[in-house]
Image: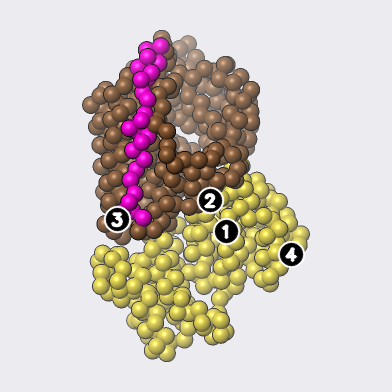
Amino acid sequence: MTARERVIKTLEFDSPDRAPRDLWALPGVGMLRSEELEAVNRQYPSDFAGPGGRYGPSSVSRGNPAEVGTYVDDWACEWTVAEVGVVGEVKNPPLADWGRLDGWTPPWELLDNADLSGVNASCAATDKFVKTGTHVRPFERMQFLRGTENLFVDIMCQPEEFKELCRRIHEFNLRDIEMWAQTNVDAIGFMDDWGTQQTLLIDPELWRAIFKPMYKDYCDICKAHGKYVFFHSDGHIMSIYPDLIEIGMDAVNSQLFCMNIEEIGRLFKGKLTFWGEICRQHILPFGAVEDARAAVKRVRSALDDGTGGVIAQCEWGVRDPKENIEAVFEAWLEENEKETT
Amino acid sequence: MEELLEQLAVCVERGKVNAASPYPPDMKGEDGADELTKKALDEGIAPDDVLAKGLVIGMGRVGQKFSENKVFVPDLLMAAKAMSAGMAYLKPFFEAGEAHHKGVFIIGTVQGDLHDIGKNLVAMVVEGGGWKVVDLGVDVSPEKFVEAVSENDGCVVGLSALLTTTMVNMEKTVALIKKSAPGTKVVVGGAPLTAEFAEKIGADGYSADPQGALSFLDV
């Protein structure tokens, strides 16, 4: 079974030979612990690959997002980074003042000058499952552009400027998704962090009114082109799982350990593939190897009965012990071996 | 008097800032916390009563609902905006000693961490609970916390962190505060934190949400 077949069987609940592997590493791991990262990737090769294309060069970005200090991203948002290799925070949102919206446009040059000419060849050259990321993160994009507190007020008051900003970002996102949908990638991914530790950041009804229709449009494009849809959100998002399933998402990465994993299994197993994860707030950074192994068993027991629906994913934080990451993948192999014996 | 203060509490609870505010839609055109606070003071209601029986009541209600996951972050922010509109009228009374805070709460996000939304929410709820809040901002060094403590006798300190890499910096901050100003209470919070971690680093309290922090202070 090739890696691509394995992932597809997982997504289709068609009894893969084992849970496919997908290790995420924060930038700092690659920068500061590259040998360890390479060793783990050698021992536990990923079943996923990237597509090899690139977006067009930005006309505004400058600086290095992985270094301490400030940098400006492709959307002209100024970030401050406090620790090497750890994602920073936007401290100078360019549209904090609605007066700047009139002349503002999304960075179309990223799409207009994108070079995807090698994507189909790279898809053909690998037997791994090719998933692309995108710029699509409408909620977070508006946070970065407006500032978080401003955006929350916008969501409640819904001024015309907010609606216009939504429209422009959505237009960009539709073209972004459309662009990738016309390639031979297997899946398209997008994201937004929606949860606190306990619940959704905003009222689920507001989420359904404002953001769900956007996500549905993205899913529709993907489905029309035969692509799988992958989505990531931090936090407790149990209240919108049914919506994510309804609009056609195939795989969702969320902080399972913020939520009731067993309840998630009871409600959603077989309807959605769980794209990881293992608790990155407590177990991976501070737990013992035994804790990491037990966490895998818990996920396996709750969400995976051997027919698929779970991807063996975890995120390697910059100070997480390598042994805990290795333990996750060891435990997944053992769990899958139990299934086959 | 009671009716006016109850109206004021409702405005804070619902996030009705002023008459011009379009939010919440079902209160469009009605007076908000801005107008009602001014009216209460003009009618001669004591500033301490406006605070304790109006603004604080409203903020307490929304904070409680937030801790029960019945309202969400934007609701809390709108309530805080309404609260601030009312507090602006009380400021001169605080300065003149005619209105009184329950105490001083010093808050900041610990060194190395730039996240502020959680810290800001706690600050809003605590201020809405009648405390004077000294917000030191983000990426605050242990020394800066200690300096602020030395300038505010009897204060309580709140430490925030969002990242697993920065929550460990709390321990050093707690230790330095306890060393320089023994008896100073410290409460900690943030997404990856637990009560066990708080105890381990020597903090006096942990809260998973803003209302919990206020409850810790009010005890």
- Judged from the image, the secondary structure of the residue bearing numbered disc 3 is helix
Q: Amino acid at mark 1?
A: Gly
Q: Is residue A302 magenta?
A: no
Frontmost of labels 2 and 4 is 2
- Judged from the image, the secondary structure of the residue bearing numbered disc 1 is loop
Question: Hue of chain A?
Answer: brown
**At 51% across and 21% down in the image, what residue appears?**
A332
* As drawn, B144 above or below B4: above
Residue positioned most to the right: B179
The colour scheme is by chain
Query: Separation of disc 3 and disc 2 at Cα?
Result: 26 Å
Query: Separation of disc 2 and disc 1 at Cα?
Result: 9 Å
Residue picked out by circle 2 = B115
Q: Amino acid at mark 4?
A: Ala
Residue picked out by circle 1 = B137
Q: Is residue A117 magenta?
A: yes
Instruction: Judge left or right: residue A3 versus residue B162.
Output: left
Residue B178 appears anywhere in the view: yes
Q: Position of residue A267 (x, y in %)?
A: 34, 35
Q: Amino acid at mark 3?
A: Glu
Q: Residues within 10 Å of mark 2 (few under 14, many from 20)?
A: many
* Pointer 3 and pointer 1 on the same chain: no
**At 54% across and 40% down in the image, what residue appears?**
A63
Residue picked out by circle 4 = B181
- Looking at marks 2 and 4 on the same chain, the residue that comes earlier in the sequence is marked by 2
Of all chains, the one bearing label 3 is A
Q: How many marks?
A: 4
Q: Position of residue B146 (x, y in %)?
A: 70, 62
Of all chains, the one bearing label 4 is B
Query: Separation of disc 3 and disc 4 at Cα?
Result: 49 Å
